[in-house]
Every structure is written in C-alpha cells, then in structure tokens.
Image (spheres, coloured by chain):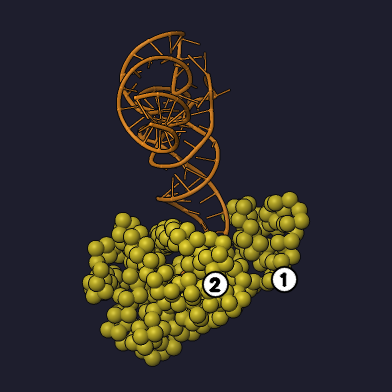
Chain colours: A yellow, B orange
Amino acid sequence: MSDKKSILIIAGPTAVGKTEASLLLAREFRTEIVSADSMQIYRGMDIGTAKPTKKQRELVFHHMIDIVEPEQAYSVGDYLRDARSAIDRILASGRTPLVVGGTGLYIRALTRGLFSGPPADKDLRAQLHQREMENSPGTLYAELVKRDTDAAARIHPNDLRRTMRALEVYYLKDKKLSEFQREHAFNDVPYRFTLLFLTRERTELYPRIEKRVDQMIADGLESEVRGLMARGYSPDLVSMKGLGYQHFIGVCRGTSSRDDATAFLKRDTKRFAKRQFTWFRREPQAAWIDITGLSQPEEIVARIKKSIEISNKLV
RNA sequence: GGGGAGGUUCCCGAGCGGCCAAAGGGAACAGACUGUAAAUCUGUCGGCGUCAGCCUACGGAGGUUCGAAUCCUCCCCUCCCCA
C-alpha cells in the first residue's frame, strides 16, 4: 500500500440521485465536494445543469461549480489543474475529498492524469478546418494517416474532431499523438481512490429523467436560456451545446416549439445517460452500485457506505 | 345505407409478381473516446445458425401462379365524403 491520500468519487448517470446523496454524505464526513461535471462549471447555467441549489451549497462547500462564464473555453486540462488543486487543499486539511459528477473524461483525468499535450490552438484548428472544407472530405484524415498512422488507425475517418486534434498535437509538438498516448497510458495516478458508479434500472432511470426535465421547465429553463441568449452567446459555444440549452435556443428564437424541444431534450438526456453507462462500463476501477428502488437519500447513502466498507476491506 | 382511401417489420412510411427480411426515416440497443466530452464519432436493428442456409413475417382465410407484400374471392378493421 502506498502513502497516497484517498479520495472518494461518486459518479453515475444523470438523474440517478448523486447530488442529494453526496450532500448527505459530505455533511456526515464533514468534508467538501469537488464537482466533476463539465456543465456545472458555467456561471448562470443553473436550471439546465441541475446544479445544487444555493442552500445546498451553503450546507456543503462545492468546488468546481460556477468557475467560468459560459463564453469562456474550459478544457479537461483546465479542469484537471483546478480540481486537483482543490482536492489537494481538502486533503491538506486532513479530510477526504468527495468528488461527485458524471463527466467520465474529467474523472479519468483526475484519477489517472492526462498526457502533457498542447492546449487547443484556435487558429491552427481554423486553418485545418478550412483545409478540409476547401478540399474533399477526408483530406485531413488522409493527412493524419501520413503523419501519425497509429493515431489514424484508432480514429474513425468521419471523426473530424479527433482527426484535427491529432494533427494539432503533431504540428504543435512535432510529436505524434499516438506516442504521447503510448508513453502516458493514463498512468499518472496521484491518489488512491474509490470510484463508485451509482446506477438504476433504465425502467426507473428514464422516467426519472423525464420527470426532471419537466421540473426544469417548470422551474424556468426557458427564461434561463432566454437570459443567456440576451447576453449574445453563440449557439456554437460549448456551454450552449449543453443539454437543455441547445434545445431551448430554438424555442427562444421561435424556430421550434416548446413541445418538440421538451421531447428532444428528454430523448437526448436518455441517450446521454446511455453513453455514461458505456463510459463507466469500461472504467476498470468503477464499482457499480445499483440503487434501483431507493428513493431516499438516506437509503442511498447507507448503500454507499456499505460498499465503501467492502472496498476498504479489499484494499 | 351509398361512394372513396387504406391496413407493411417497435413506430412512421416506400414497395405493387421473382433482384424483398422488405427502400428511407424515427425510436431503441451496442460501441469508441487523453485539452469542445451534456461534445464528437461508429455499429446493429425478425428469430436461429458450424454464416452455407433454415424458419417466421407484409390485417384474416382461401385461390391463381414455377413463384405473391404485390393478382383474384370472401371476411375483419380504420379513415374520409355523401345520405
């Protein structure tokens, strides 16, 4: 056993019930929460991201929420830096940080690091994108096949985003993405961690998602989006691509109906939950905890504590 | 009661004698993922299978044909118009 400090991570698909349970748990452990949610970092996006309320945040201190404006770019790299520093502060105070969220990549970065690649270069990306547009589709992919064959082999030819990032890494660092990945291999593990993935049967999760979407709308999602639009945000912003925001922009502009937006939001949120299942399914250290049938935060916490005991015995 | 349109795989919807397990779309399911990740991308989609095939399918029952989702007969159901 190493002398690394421990952190507890509570992950799970949207609407399983992470927030309430983690709040209770954090109070009991007298600790603070570090959010691992790629959308809750944005200020002013409260309803659509199901952010913990002001009251809840007075009860337990939350890190990594409301840290940037919606028009600011914020990458996994930024997240890793900021979240680790928050975690280190909590650890330094002698407590066990409670990481809570559903963004798989953020959690992986937190627990196993990122290779030290270059941050996104807007100009270079624009250049690359233009090159693809001016030539036939697949131009960039063909370029990648030449520059970094191994990376290309792992990227689908249609996945322009990943193709561009691989080229970006190559041109900026004069080193292949595949090489970075091979050397790093997610081996930067600074903490001991217990990663719990809360789940529910889909027959229960999906109705919860629908209910939650209805609640968001009742709580004023549309006017929240309207307010964001009034600030002149482009729909192309990462923040505005968030579930709910991308859907209600059309409603605010009068190009789509409220009913359609609601239906699509429900559908897309379910799909998102499905992708979260896929992600954590192949996260080797994630312990799945089925909380189907448990509706009270107390019950969920009891269930969580039980599995922590079990995993502690195993360690 | 009279006239018209139609019933296709989970849904919508094309097919109108063989090339049809049946276009296309939707939904669903599965997968990938290292600086946009609530994003981006991919695959499957009647069942069985040693992948060659076999079985079940186009409202129901018969019939014509070498061969029918496609043609004929009767029946059941839906929608529209006139009474």
Task: Name the image quarter holding residue A56.
Answer: bottom left
Task: Name the image quarter holding residue A308.
Answer: bottom left
B70 to A18, vertically: above or below? above
Task: Name the image quarter holding residue A305.
Answer: bottom left
Q: Tag 2: Cα neighbours inside 10 Å, few (<14), some, or many (≥20)?
A: many
- What amino acid type is highlighted by mark number 1? Asp
Q: Chain of mark 1?
A: A
Viewed as shown, does residue A203 lie left or right of A137?
A: left
Q: Which residue is mark 2?
A: A239
Q: Chain of mark 2?
A: A
Give the label on residue A74, or none: none
Viewer-closest of A158 and A243? A243
Q: CA distance from mark 1 to mark 2?
A: 20 Å
- What amino acid type is highlighted by mark number 2? Ser
Task: Say whether disc 1 or disc 2 marks the residue closer to the N-terminus.
Answer: 1
Q: Position of residue A196 (x, y in %)?
A: 34, 69
Q: Tag 1: Cα neighbours inside 10 Å, few (<14), some, or many (≥20)?
A: few
Give the label on residue A123, or none: 1
Q: Position of residue A64 (x, y in %)?
A: 47, 81
Task: Give the residue at x 31% y 56%.
Answer: A203
Q: Position of residue A157 (x, y in %)?
A: 63, 52
Q: Position of residue A175 (x, y in %)?
A: 68, 66
Task: Give the residue at x 52% y 65%.
Answer: A251
Asked if residue A142 can be seen in this view, the reply is no
Q: Quadrant of the N terminus of chain A?
A: bottom left
Mark 2 lies on a secondary structure that is helix
Mark 1 lies on a secondary structure that is helix
Q: Are marks 1 and 2 on the same chain?
A: yes
Viewed as shown, does residue A6 lie left or right of A294?
A: right
